[in-house]
Image: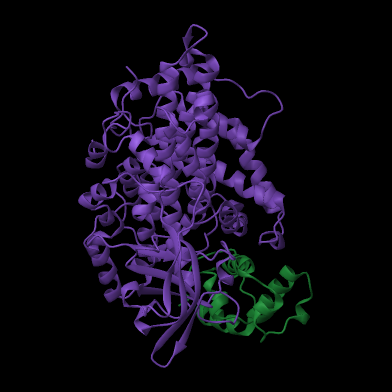
Amino acid sequence: MTRLEERFGDPYNADNPFGHRTILDADERSTVAEGAEAVLDEFGLNAEFVPEALGGRLVEVDELVRRLRPVFRRDASLGLGYGVTSLMAGLNVWLGGSDVQRKWLADLLLGGGKASVGYHELDRGNDLTNNEFAATRTEDGLVLDGRKEVINNAARADAAVLFARTGGKGGGRDHSLLLVDLHQLDGGTFRRLPRYRTLGLRGVGLSGFEFTGCAVPDSALVGDLGQGSDIALRSFQVSRCVMAGTGLGILDAGLFGVLRFALERRLYGQTVAELPHARATLAGAYADLLTADALVTTATRALHVLPATASAYAAATKLLVPTLLEEAMNALSVVLGARFYLREGDYAGFGKHMRDLPPLGIGHAGGISCQLTLLPQLSRLLRALGDPAPAAVFTAGAALPELDLSRLRLFAPSGDPLLAELAAHGTHPGIAAALAKLTADVAALPARDTGVAASPAALDLTDRYAALLAAASVTGYARHNAVPDGWAELALSRLAERLTPSAALPATHPAAEGALFADLLDRATTGSGFCLDRDPVHRTLAQ
Amino acid sequence: MTSTDTTTSTSTTVPADIAQWLAGRVASYLDTDAATIDLDLPLAEYGLDSVYALSLCGDIEDTLGLVVEPTLAWDYPTVNAMAEFLQAEIA
């Protein structure tokens, strides 16, 4: 069992200071459980965000996602609020910063400091190229004007990476990234904004920054002037995968909670878990959790193995995974019945997990923004089949090449190596048909329909691409690793139904569902997590 | 800042006049005639956004056998500037 899993203990133990009750009480007060951040400090969670070459523990991105899971299983506010945004800020500096900047930020994070990442302005959303926060060049530095809003940790961060307008020519060279030491700024020209109240992730301290003619030295520039979009679009590829991956812990915890309830609660003379509908819902949610994990695992490993196509995989992952997870939580809420709506009692944690999921989908890069990354690339990705992806993309634990952020590209070359997996190794007939249909539809898509003015039908192509990537991830992962019986069959059938909804009721797979439910139960009783790596967890069923 | 990789593509026939060829591609995105494209006017002035930069990258890879990033359109914003850069890469 990992140290964090051990330290945070069983959420259902009423005496556990990091149990559900404490976490929910804290959430009601818009904070996190007392002492929980100290546990992460003691563990040195920030080191996970710092590359090994700079003294941290960041080597493989899929391992990073797994190491964050114990935190997100308990409280997404704790994980995000403590510092996943320090990673988002850091990636820009690891990629584009000078040696001095890299060492300074690495040391700051390793010493327990926090970095905020300032892209967002409320009036601009994901429309980064129209951001208004500006840095104006002067003789002896830069002068900052404007606001960054709904920024994690803005009230307490030591450093910030800010995305600033530095030009007005139009095109992609109008923005630059700045790394700023917030303690060095003049209090008369810089202030931290009040906190925003939110529906979910209530324990996260979201606020903002306001600059009014605030001077910073030239050395704040990350990379060259005008290189902001370039650096940001590469570092997003890593952070999109990680953000999507954090959601796996939430569904894992939600699924355990509902299973626990279904085994405990008796209705009509039997437990809820014995009712066919409840059992099928639990098995379906478990299948979708594993599918989401397969896509996250493949996309994070592709950052190392297939960096040229990673921009498409990261966008597809950030598009589909939050949707899969939210739909699974919605389906599970039906099994929980009225308890799903209560903010107290043993199962109130489920409602909190459900509130915390949507902001993970919206946050960082919303679905539409991911769709717009994918849409102009589809015709090239689907034009021809590339060479099938190497086994290392799918094989858990196989050695990965070093993460080289400079090899990530903004535009994937022809021929998708992951989709080639579907062609090379056969697949569900519904998946094969959907791939053929998508290929034909994309070939007929005019270039003018691939931008922000794209039609809903054009955007739908990106949803179908993401579902096909998930199918390829399931197929590849199942070929190279031991997986639960019935999963691949059920997962592909559910993805095929998503790709081409049938008028009739979806086909049932009683044998596959039965096998998956048995595996789910086995994991729940033996203290194993519900993700692909079957990691040991601390949580108990009702006695 | 912009970099390219040369790919060996057997099926490509490099157009003799790269600037004219680029103007033709740009005109096709705009649904207009290549003759109306001013080779020294920044493409952004025609309302060509980052999405077209991606389409252009695809066309360049297919026709010239050069793998380029969309940053090409940022660093060489006019048809003539881009053509000059691409000509040097091919040579």
Residue at horizontal 67%, vertical 42%?
Answer: A437
Q: Nearer the viewer, residue B85 or A130?
A: A130
Residue at horizontal 39%, vertical 42%?
Answer: A394
Task: Report x, y in % for residue A143.
Answer: 44, 84
**Which residue reaches farthest bottom?**
A139
Question: Which quarter of the rendering shows the C terminus of chain A?
Answer: top left
Residue B5 visible in the shown view: no
Quarter where residue A541 is shown: top left
Task: Report x, y in % for residue A97.
Answer: 35, 73
Q: Nearer the viewer, residue A354 or A99?
A: A354
Residue A524 visible in the shown view: yes
Question: Which quarter of the rendering shows the N terminus of chain A?
Answer: top left
From what the image shows, is residue A473 above or below residue A149?
above
Question: Which color has been applied to chain B in this rendered view?
Answer: green
**Which residue reaches farthest top?**
A269
Q: Nearer the viewer, residue A85 or B29?
A: A85
Task: Report x, y in % for residue A14.
Answer: 30, 29
From what the image shows, is residue A449 above or below residue B41?
above
- Apparent side of residue A69 relative to residue A171 in the rendered image (left or right): left
- Image chain in purple: A
Quarter where residue A259 is shown: top left
